[in-house]
Amino acid sequence: MVVARSIALKAVNTASLWGLNRSRFGGLPKVQTVRALSTVMSPPSKAVVYEHHGPPDSVTRMIELPPVEGQENQVCVKMLAAPINPSDINRIEGVYPVRPQVPAVGGYEGVGEVYSVGSAVKGLSPGDLVIPSPPSSGTWQTYVVKDHDIWHKISKDSPIEYAATVTVNPLTAIRMLEDFTTLSAGDSIVQNGATCIVGQCVIQLARYRGIHSINIIRDRAGSDEVKERLKALGADEVFTESQLEVKNVKSLLSNIPEPALGLNCVGGHAASLVLKFLRQGGTMVTYGGMSKKPVTVSTSSFIFKDLSLRGFWLQKWLSADKAKECRDMVDYLLRLAQERKLKYEMELVPFDKFHSALEKALGKHGSQPKQVIKF
């Protein structure tokens, strides 16, 4: 109980406690709402916590937390869903550059329903659908209390699983398409790691804007099915890495122009393949390193092709006074999801099966859809 109390006290200090939702995902649950009070008291809660950094499947556990009292300018939100992202895993392992102080509650994004509001809160009412925007740590718990300006009210028509996952991956995709070079209809981009959610979003957002996409995937069983699935999303070309072991990769393209922008989330040889496609003066943006291998570039690529290498980290973009722009982008992306113009595969998992979902997110059962916890 000492550990539980220390985490509960931390939750009070950071105002992060989420709400238990025992309903199924058949639409928004019916919840008991509470009128505005001078202070906010959350119900008892459950949370996935870690007391020190290490392997997530070893250091995380689910505990009971007592009610938390918030302040008049705070909001208590009942959790509906939250994903397990690679960045969440990196935070628990202690390798992410920005991470909460331990002991901590896991999770970074999600969606919930307002349960109660403090007396000074304006613009939010019990029953509103909200997300933390920009995202905020501590979303793997059943009730959360945070300052009112953390919460962004979204349309109640928003698909819950997309509302839970819209900020980290889709927002990364749209920012990289907009922030590094000017792309117009008819232009093209190239990316590796095309099966990840960022990659899937890039394909769809590019197609929506009339931009061609060239996509690189790993060689593995079922690659033909993966190619067809990505083409159904709007991919123009999909190649396995082995298909690109030719002297001139651009000869594989038909009527697609040489890409001005390349996106890399793998590193190593897969990054070199992206560089091969880029046109004179092109830019490659690195936003991940799944292979844990460095990005290498030939001297001739710098001198004779004048290529640029850039990096993108969503948290840095969000910290640059981008809250309003972030929320506008989130609303735009959720409209696309509602219209089925943006979609990606997810698996909804009950909160009490968290550690099964975590094993899948860690890759212990091969390639799996994005794991999203439902409360």
Image (cartoon, rainbow, N blue to C red):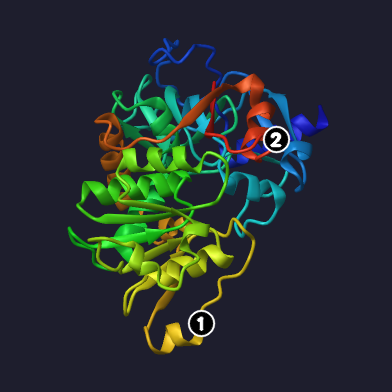
Q: Is residue 265 visible?
A: no
The one of 150 and 282 positioned closer to us in this rendering: 282
> What residue appears at the point 52 percent right and 32 percent down from the top-left corner?
82
Where is residue 59? Give x, y as percent. Answer: 77, 39
Residues under labels 2 and 1: Cα distance? 45 Å
Q: Which secondary structure lies at badge 2? A: strand
Give the residue furthest to the right.
2
Amino acid type at circle 1 is Ser
The residue under label 1 is: 298
Q: Up-down: is 10 above or below 294?
A: above
Q: Which mark is residue 114?
A: none
Q: Is residue 288 above or below residue 78?
A: below
Front in this rendered view, residue 236 or 126: 236
Measured as percent of width and height from the top left, residue 283 is found at: 37, 72
Quarter of the figure with residue 20 = top right
Q: Nearer the viewer, residue 58 or 375?
A: 58
Q: Nearer the viewer, mark 2 or mark 1?
A: 1
Q: Is residue 36 visible?
A: yes
Q: Circle 2: is it few (<14), some (14-19), or many (20+) Cα within 10 Å?
A: many
Does label 2 or label 1 sit earlier along the sequence?
A: 2
Rendered image: mark on residue 49: 2
Residue at x 21% of width, y 51% of height? 209
Choose top left, top right, bottom left or bottom right for residue 117: top left
Vertical order, 340 against 325 (above or below): above
x and y, in percent, of residue 75 in the image = 45, 30
Q: Position of residue 359 (x, y in %)?
A: 68, 34
Name the residue at 40% across, 62% down: 320
Residue drawn at x 48%, y 12% is 24
How busy is the neighbourhood of tag 1: few (under 14 within 10 Å), some, or many (20 plus)? few
